[in-house]
Image: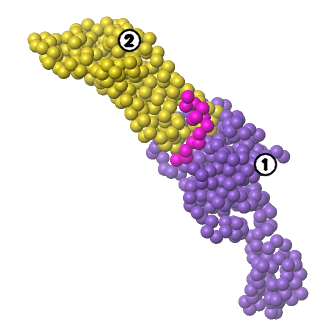
Amino acid sequence: MLGNVFVKSLRDQRKALLGWSIGILALVALEGALWPSIKRMPALNELLASYPEPLRKLLRLEDFASGTGFMNAELFSAMLPILFIALGIGRGARAIAGEEEAGTLEVLLVTPVSAARLVLHQAAALAATALALGFVLYGAMLAASAVFGLGIGVADLAGATLAMVLLGVEFGWFALALGAVTGRRAVAVAGTSSVAVAAYVLYAAGELVDAVRPWQPVSPFYQALHGGPLGAGVPVAYLWMVLAGAVVVGATLPIFDRRDIAAR
Amino acid sequence: MTAVIHASALSKSYHGRAALRGIDLDVPGGVIFGYLGPNGAGKTTTIRLLAGLLRPTGGRAEVCGFDTVRDRERAQRRIGYLPGEFVGYPDLTGEQYLRYLANLRGGVDPSVVRDLAGRLDLELTVRIGTLSHGNRQKIGIVQAFMHQPEVLLLDEPTSGLDPLVQREFLAMLREVRDQGRTAFLSSHVLYEVEAVADMVAILRRGQLVVVESVDKLKAQAMRRIDLTFEGQPPLAELQAATGVREARASGPAAHVMVEGSTAAMLRVAAPHGVAQIVTHEPDLEEIFMTYYGQGATDDAG
């Protein structure tokens, strides 16, 4: 029953969510299955020591010899953030700009549903989708930990999963906002991707270059990944991710409300 | 009667290019209003301004007394809108789509939806993506009509409809009018509007050239009259009569074009013994073409 925009938006994502879930399950299973053989590698520590210093710092290879550190380096530092952010950007760009380009937005707006409510419903649906994928990740990782003896704590995993979800939500909301302002999906995707890459570069550079380090906390990647994310608990910095996303969405509401809606 | 649709000095420019140049318009309640003009004249721009999807760059518009900018949501509650290019969600069936919009609107009677779909011969259980253009257009029409709005804004509503469905659609429009509601529809072909509209406006290059009731337009229209005389037609006298724009003779017959009243022409003709008289219905198409003028079909925007 499509009662409102939120429900409709969730329904639109069922298949995509299923696809993303299968991807996450496969990824976690694969990495988890690698762990027992990695752990038994006699020369593991020498191998890690042979990595260049900057790479060791960025991927936190010092902790590689524990299950938690292994998953931080293999999945939570790059692969999972990319997946969640890709989900968020794709969905966010489609939410308003995609509908506008398809031509379905016009009729939707000439209803008692206000422009602002439409954006908020879409933002909520995006967050719910990212959260749903977060539950899949949590379940998969918990199972993998038990099966392959990764020894990842329940609370640690919850904090790290939340970091992934929040990265997806923040950049997803950014794409949603950019799409609502420009009405163009390609602009929303490209613009947000650029911001995400810039944020990652800032984070990575901060790990390696002393001069950049003071700026590092501005990056959502720092907020999400610093000190873990597995094992970092639930840092207060997570709040910044929600806040920044909410501010960007909030700022676009009056702009979207006042701009012309494109005809197909 | 107060106007249900009101526009004063309504203007819209896109990036400095004027699409609508100061329109003044009052559409009373309970009429079918035909909005005519060639492609690119500004019909779609007007309708989208009235629907609250565009913001005027000058002037203002009201629907049911509500400003389309300041009171947009309240105005939109009273509107049923069919875009010039209607698009539904291709992965939903007609029924799912219409129920979704009905939920967003609230207060839609499901039996009205069923009735409308039945009249237009619309299959509701099929995905919109698999429907033909005409059948998608029917879904657009149903969503515009289903909440029985006070004002219908319909941009080229009959595009893609076959003649039988078109006739049913015109009947639906008349019912809307008979219930005291208002239908504002754009078209670039006159005959479909002529059959159903009470009033028409003709738009050319972003400006209104005429707003008039169809009856009055017809009264003004040139009427072709063929007179067959018992003797030679009095051609010179006919040409001189008031209202006669053109007179030609061929044998005993005279072909006369009269604008407005035919009284003066008939007074002149009668003494010469009129054996037969045939008058042709005035054709709005001719007026339409006059107002369109030459070279009015700029296809921009």
Q: Which chain is yellow?
A: A
Whole-percent x and y of residue A246? 51, 23
Residue lying furthest left in this view?
A42
Give the labeled residue for mark 2: A159
The quadrant in which residue A71 appears is top left
**Is B176 part of what is drawn in magenta?**
no
Residue B233 in the image: above or below residue A260 = below
How many marks are shown on the rendered structure? 2
Residue B7 in the image: above or below residue B268 = above
Q: Which chain is purple?
A: B
Residue at image point 49% right, 36% down: A179
Whole-percent x and y of residue A261? 57, 42
1 and 2 marks in contact (CB < 8 Å)? no
Give the left or right position of residue A173, taking residue A226 as reference.
Answer: right
Image quarter in which the C terminus of chain B is found: bottom right
Label 1 resides on the chain identified as B
Give the left or right position of residue B45, taking residue A204 as reference.
Answer: right
Q: Is residue B39 visible?
A: yes
Segment tinted magenta in the rendering: A251-264
Q: In this orientation, which residue lies closer to the viewer: A240 or A104?
A: A240
